[in-house]
Image (cartoon, rainbow, N blue to C red):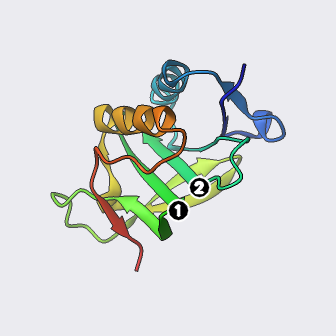
């Protein structure tokens, strides 16, 4: 039984990677954190008519989150006030570059916890991390 689907590579572009639990999502994130490139993973609950946009940028032992939808209209990124850089970091999704703000980067442990929260809430924006709306 699939509850969510992750999209991040050309190999899975049509069908995605089925995720039946938050633990499966976490295992995928841990696997992707060992890759040499920065990866952008989109996660959807396909059966949700109000499906929010949720994405996870993975960069080794750090990452960033993107959210849009439900009660949070606009584009929202995680926010790390300790990072003052206003630059962008490129992540890759199916050979396409995706930019996310440098100050959206958080330790992977926080990213994993927020991703689990997203999964358990069936698509609500995680409250365990700080967010900033894109200007």
| Residue 106 pos. (x, y %) | 29, 46
Mark 1 lies on residue: 68
Instruction: Please report the residue visible at 32 percent of the width from the left and 51 percent of the height from the top.
Output: 105
Q: Point out which mark residue 53 bears.
A: 2
Query: In the image, is residue 87 above or below residue 48?
Result: below
Q: Where is residue 19 drawn, in percent x and y? A: 64, 25
Question: Which residue is located at x 59 percent, y 55 percent?
Answer: 53
Instruction: Confirm or deny contact between disc 2 and disc 1 (CB under 8 A).
Output: yes
Q: Quadrant of residue 111?
A: top left
User: Can residue 118 be seen at all in this image of the molecule?
Assistant: yes
- Name the residue at 77% across, 40% down: 10
* Residue 114 disc label: none
Task: Farthest residue to the right: give it.
Answer: 14
Q: Quadrant of residue 8?
A: top right
Relative side of 59 to 97, left or right: left
Residue 111 position (above or below residue 76): above
Q: Is residue 8 or residue 123 the one in the foreground? A: 123
Q: Is residue 37 left or right of residue 8?
A: left
Quarter occupied by the N terminus: top right
Q: Position of residue 122 (x, y in %)?
A: 54, 39
């Amino acid at each position: 039984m699939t509850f969510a689907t992750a999209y991040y590579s050309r190999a899975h572009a049509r069908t995605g990677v089925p995720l039946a639990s938050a633990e499966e999502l976490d295992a995928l994130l841990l696997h992707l954190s060992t890759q040499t490139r920065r990866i952008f993973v989109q996660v959807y609950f396909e059966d949700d008519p109000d499906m929010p946009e949720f994405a996870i940028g993975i960069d080794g032992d750090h990452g960033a989150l993107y959210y849009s939808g439900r009660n949070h209209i606009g584009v929202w990124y995680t926010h790390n006030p300790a990072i003052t850089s206003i630059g962008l970091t490129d992540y890759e999704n199916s050979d396409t570059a995706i930019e996310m703000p440098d100050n959206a980067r958080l330790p992977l442990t926080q990213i994993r916890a927020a991703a689990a929260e997203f999964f358990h809430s069936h698509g609500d924006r995680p409250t365990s991390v700080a967010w900033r709306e894109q200007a």
